[in-house]
Amino acid sequence: MPEICLLGTGGMLPLKDRFLTSLYAEYNGKAVLIDCGEGTQVAIAKHGLKLSRIELLLITHCHADHVTGLPGLLLSIGNSSRTEPLDIAAPESCLPVLRNLMTVCGALPYEVRLHGLPENSSCEFSADMIDSMLTIKTLPLSHRVSCLGYSLLLSRKPPFLPENAKALNIPVEYWKRLHAGEAVTLDDGRSIAPDAVTGEKRAPIKITYTTDTLPIAELAGFAESSDLFICEGMYGLPEKKESMNEKCHMLMQDACDIAVKANVKRLWLTHYSPAEKEPAIYAEELRQIFPEAVITADGAKITL
C-alpha cells in the first residue's frame, strides 16, 4: 500500500522549525515527489526517506518556494549513485525555469527528462516508472501563475479468493498469475479466467494535492472521494479572506468547505503562512466544518 509523508508544511519561505510544503508518496519501493522548495533534500533525510527511490517529480508551479530546492535535490540524488533516468513533469511554461535551475548542477550521472503538461486544461497520464497501475490526473488551478493540482490514482487488484481456487483444484503456482488478471490453462486442459477466483473490483486509492489557488468550484469534483486530500490553508483567520483572494490563496476554512463538497475521507491542511506560528489553534473550529480535518506538522505520515 502507498506510504505518504508530508515533508514540510510551510509556504513562502522555510522557517527554522518548518520546511516548505512537499509530498513524498512511495509504493513498492518507488516514489513520487510533489514540489521541491529550498531544503527538500534535507527534509527527506530528516524524515528517514530515500532519495534513491524517487522516480518522478511533479511541480505545481514555478514560484520559488516550490522549485528552488531542485538543484540541491538533483545533486544529492547524483551522490546516491543513481544512473537511471529521472522524470520531471510540470506546467509547460515552467520548463525554461527548470532548465535554468539545472544549469548550476553541471553534469549529472543520470538523465533528467522534462515533460511539459497542459496549463489550461486537465490531463491524465500513466506513471509507468512507478507502477503500471498508477494514473496521474491534473487540474489547472487559479493562481498568479500557471499552477496545477495533482491526483494520484492507484488501481487495486480485486481480492483473491483462495477458497474458490481450492474448490476448483487450482494448483497454488497459478494463483499469483490469476490474481494479476491473467487467464491460465491448467495441466488437465481446463482454462481458468481470473474472475473465477477474485472478488468485486475495488475503487482505486486516490490522493489529491492542491496548493496555491483560489477555492475554485472545480476543486470539489477533482478531489471527489479522495482517500487523502492535501490542501493549502494559508491562514485560519476569516479576516484574512480579502487578502487571500488578492494573492490567490485559500483560508483553512476554504479547504474544509471543499473537503465537505468533495466527500473526501481525510483532509490534511498545509502551506501555512510564516505568520501562522501555531496553526493547530484552529483545529477545533475546523473540525466543526469537516470532522476529519488535520492541521498537519512536518513529517506527517500515513499508509493508505
Image (spheres, rainbow, N blue to C red):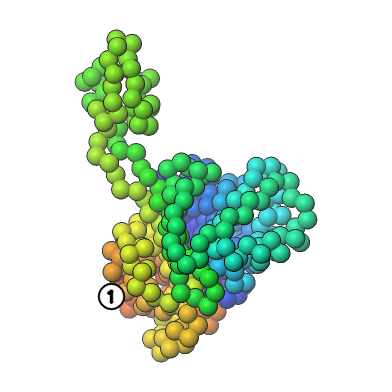
Q: Position of residue 84 (x, y in %)?
A: 65, 42
From this view, report whether residue 217 is shown above or below residue 304. below
How many discs appear? Answer: 1
Considering depth in this image, is 260 or 142 the residue closer to the camera?
142
Considering depth in this image, is 212 or 165 the residue closer to the camera?
212
Amino acid type at mark 1 = Gln
Please name the residue that numbered disc 1 is placed on. 288
Q: Position of residue 290 (x, y in %)?
A: 30, 71
Q: Position of residue 274 (x, y in %)?
A: 55, 79
Residue at x-position 64% and y-position 45%: 85
Give the quadrant of the N terminus: top left
Which residue in the rendered view is the most extreme toward the right?
A: 106
Residue at x-position 46% and y-position 78%: 249
- Can residue 51 be seen at all in this image of the molecule? no
- Can residue 247 be seen at all in this image of the molecule? yes
Q: Quadrant of residue 264?
A: bottom left
Q: Quadrant of residue 59?
A: bottom right
- SS at mark 1? helix
**What is the crowding at mark 1: few (fewer than 14 residues within 10 Å), some, or many (at least 20)?**
few
Residue at x-position 48% and y-position 86%: 246
Residue at x-position 28% and y-position 64%: 263
From this view, report whether residue 302 is shown above or below residue 184. below
Which residue in the rendered view is the most extreme toward the left?
A: 167
Q: Is residue 291 left or right of residue 79?
A: left
